[in-house]
Amino acid sequence: MKRLIACTLLAFMLFMLFPFGAKADEGMWLPMLIQKYNFADMQSKGFKLTAEDIYSVNQPSIKDAIVIFGGGCTGEVISPEGLLITNHHCGYGNIQKHSSIEHDYLTNGFWAMSRSEELPNPGLTVSFLVRMDDVTQQALAGVTSEMTESQRVEIIKKNSDAISKEVTEGTHYSARVTPMYNGNQYFVFIYEVFTDVRLVGAPPSNVGKFGGDTDNWMWPRHTGDFSMFRIYADKDNKPAQYSAENVPYTPKRHLPISLKGVEPNDFTMVYGYPGTTQQYVTSQAVNEVVNISNPLKISLRDARLEIMENYMRQNDTVRIQYASKQAGVANAWKKWQGERNGLIRLDAINKKQNLESDFNQWVSQDPNRTKEYGHLLNRFSELYTARKPLLVANDLGREAFMAVELIRFVSQFNSAIKRVLTDKEVSEEMLETLVTRSRGFYKDYYQPIDKEIFAEIMKTYAQILPDSLLPNALKQLVASSGDNWSVAAEKLFNESIFTDSTLIINTLADFSKENAGKFKNDMAFQLFAQHDSIFAASIDSSYREINQELDLLYRTYIKGLMEMQPNKTFHPDANFTLRVTYGKIEGYFPSDGVEYTHLTTLDGIAEKAQMGVYDYVVPEKLLKLQAEKDYGRWEVNGSVPVCFLASNHTSGGNSGSPVINADGHLVGINFDRVWEGTMSDIMFDPNMCRNISIDIRYALFIIDKYAGATHLLNEMTLIE
Ligand code: ARG
Ligand code: GLU
């Protein structure tokens, strides 16, 4: 009885705290709306600055220290001289490109001991957000309720282009208009993009990727997942292409670094660019993830990874060539598993179904609601049923067919070949891009891996897909190989001219109609071209059509949900725009009888080193520092803090995001989520969802005591 009272009391208290279903720490908020929606709550949780300190268009604010790093990560500026910190795994591709057997920066790390040693990275950009604005009215100007969805899309596209043009007129900025809440609102984001970004420092992989795939997405974690770059600008502090004349960029704002560390319940805020979430999808969509898409994609990647890893173990050159590719393939593969488990554990499909029946009931109470929303749930059902075979085909296209490197490679020649053969001009630039891409491709290509992947994975592809969706060239190839996929692979790779780097690069130098004809008739290219046209005719457009209608339905559904729950603050799904999420330092209980605390230390690295696991190899020098407790100023309670847990709602893209304390100081760099919480892209669970960050003091310890790059500390603002 006592327990019952206690439970009721607790439930009541929870209800008072989160009266309308808003859960603790869930939400990725738009910086310009913090004042309106979150500030009071943030303050009550300990935040000491103002909303203007987070985001302002009138004065420098923390947002001016945050960047989009490369294609899909976040970074932050930590010195008045454009020094930037992000994750090791975000800089990985670039560190790898500078690496060779002679200069193996992946293995040994890299530290520029002077500015002149900083390494340029063609193609790498960082983007600062100049400003964001609500442009819903302009974006929807001329849109009427009678329009078809594609007419609507067309008008919004036109309006968006006009908005982008207008807001960047006379500047060197670029702009993007992005829908929020599935198109119930529109915002424009204006960016300043820098193109001269140089590598400054990276720890050895045994630090920066410590724990590898064994520990990826998991706690306890000991990864020193950071790397450093510097933004360069022209003499007017404006973006410029790489030039020796460029100078370090002077930012409007850089983040001070706190050396005070973190304690349980401390306020934390993560400021960065989460990629994609789908918080408001229906039960059928969750069913797709749990029972169709994730299982299929996981099994296809199982096969790919096994083959890659087998060859990587046998040969060091191959290990370097495939390091970055393998990490990418393994990363999503493991996440999909955690996400699926988490959704099952949360009983997410049922929860969504309950919400849907509440919604139906709410709709049926009012004829106007019935008119606007009454059709939604049935139509969702119909569309998801129709989508299933298309989804499977689409997954197979991406995860099987296009997983063959050779095929992905030839696909890049498609438009150049088409142009030449129809007497259209192929620009110098287009050819140069192809040459650059070809060089990059061959540098990191090991044919035996690709051949084996082809044999293994295309067999599955051909088994699952109906015959009508298979390229004729593939059927002929396999038939002429006695239905033996290894023989078929052998044949394809022997015959295709795209495996011959010299021939391809020379041909590109003289890209005549005749040469393009040879490319076109190549077996690998034929496979791609046939697949492409079959999918274009039978899959892509139907898939797109269904998705477009789903979009429309979701826009209406979310509007309805908002009306049904007028006191709940809805956060827009992540869409790689700048967001603030806040929570606190806390551990969690991953399973019965197990508690995870919030912090790991260097002692844990030494412990793992004993285990004889490949991913737990520790650099000698680091072990020595640990054994001798040679920690200098970085010692805390007899060790050095390494990683910590907090309850911030993050997603892919938040990698490299700053973790900021109540005073607005940098305490860590976000790099991962815990496995039990990876379903947070679809459903957040305050008990299980934790983000994982490297304690900034570990990064500083590595820079200072391990790498001896102490000069870098001098340009930072360290708060003791
Ligand atoms: N899971 C983290 C993220 O999604 C880290 C990935 C890099 N590490 C790795 N072992 N693949 O990006
Ligand atoms: N490692 C992820 C990234 O690259 C962050 C982890 C997550 O998905 O939360 O963005």
Image: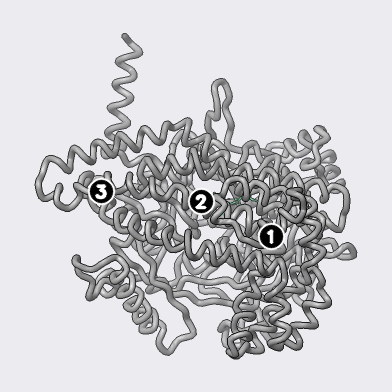
Report the residue at 44% width, 60% height from top: 575
Q: Is residue 73 above or below residue 292?
A: below
Q: Return the x and y of residue 377 as percentages of the image width and height.
A: 27, 45
Q: Return the x and y of residue 250 as percentages of the image width and height.
A: 58, 77
Front residue of this view, candidates 649 and 200: 649
Q: Which dot marks residue 651? A: 2
Q: Is mark 3 within 8 Å of ligand 2?
A: no
Q: Return the x and y of residue 487 as percentages of the image width and height.
A: 80, 53
Three-letter amino acid code of the residue under disc 1: Ser
Q: Which residue is mark 1?
A: 227
Three-letter amino acid code of the residue under disc 3: Leu
Q: CA distance from mark 3 to mark 1?
A: 47 Å
Q: Is residue 470 above or below residue 419?
A: above
Q: Which residue is mark 3?
A: 376
Q: CA distance from mark 3 to mark 2?
A: 29 Å
Front residue of this view, candidates 644 and 162: 162
* Residue projecting furthest to the top: 1
Badge 2 or badge 1: first in the primary sequence = 1
Q: Is residue 197 above or below residue 408?
A: below
Three-letter amino acid code of the residue under disc 2: Ser
Badge 3 or badge 2: first in the primary sequence = 3
**Left/right of residue 666 with respect to residue 619 in the rendered view:** left
Residue 641 makes an appearance in the image: no
Q: Residue 444 occupies which quadrant of the picture? A: bottom right
Badge 3 or badge 1: first in the primary sequence = 1
Secondary structure at badge 3 equals: helix
Pair 3/2: label in front? 3
Q: Return the x and y of residue 184 as percentages of the image width and height.
A: 28, 61
Q: CA distance from mark 2 to mark 1?
A: 20 Å
Q: Is mark 2 within 8 Å of ligand 2?
A: yes
Q: How is the image coloured?
A: one colour
Q: Residue 641 occupies which quadrant of the picture? A: top right
